[in-house]
Image (cartoon, rainbow, N blue to C red):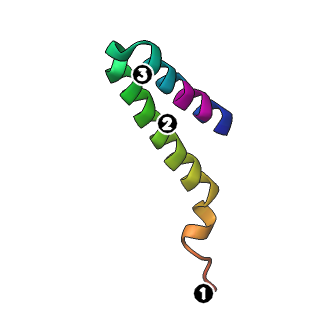
């Protein structure tokens, strides 16, 4: 998944470099990449966000 995220960021950079008129699409890809990073972080740390309690 991290490689997919890297490819999304790379595509956004390529769009800005080669096709500046597609800036809106590149920004959308960057937002999608940030959301994917946040989702992967939350999935990876869901057990450590709230520590286990002994009741």
Residue range corresponding to the magenta coloring: 6-10
Between discs 2 and 3, the one toward the N terminus: 3
Tell me, yes or no, if residue 12 can be seen here.
yes
Which residue bears the numbered disc 1?
A: 55
Pinpoint residue 49: horizontal percent, then vertical percent: 55, 68
Q: Residue at x 32, y 13 (%)?
A: 21
Q: Which mark is residue 12?
A: none
Horizontal side of residue 41 vs 34, given as left or right: right
**Residue at the bottom extreme?**
55
Which residue bears the numbered disc 2?
A: 33
Q: Which mark is residue 16?
A: 3
Task: Give the quarter of the figure containing the C terminus.
Answer: bottom right
Horizontal side of residue 19 vs 7, given as left or right: left
Q: Is residue 45 above or below residue 32?
A: below
Task: Tell me how far mark 3 sits from mark 1, CA to CA.
Answer: 54 Å
Q: Is residue 47 above or below residue 42?
A: below
């Amino acid at each position: 998944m991290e490689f997919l995220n890297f490819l999304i960021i790379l595509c956004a950079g390529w769009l800005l470099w080669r096709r500046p008129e597609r800036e809106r699409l590149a920004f959308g890809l960057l937002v999608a990449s940030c959301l994917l990073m946040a989702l992967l972080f939350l999935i990876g740390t869901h057990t450590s966000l709230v520590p286990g309690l002994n009741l």
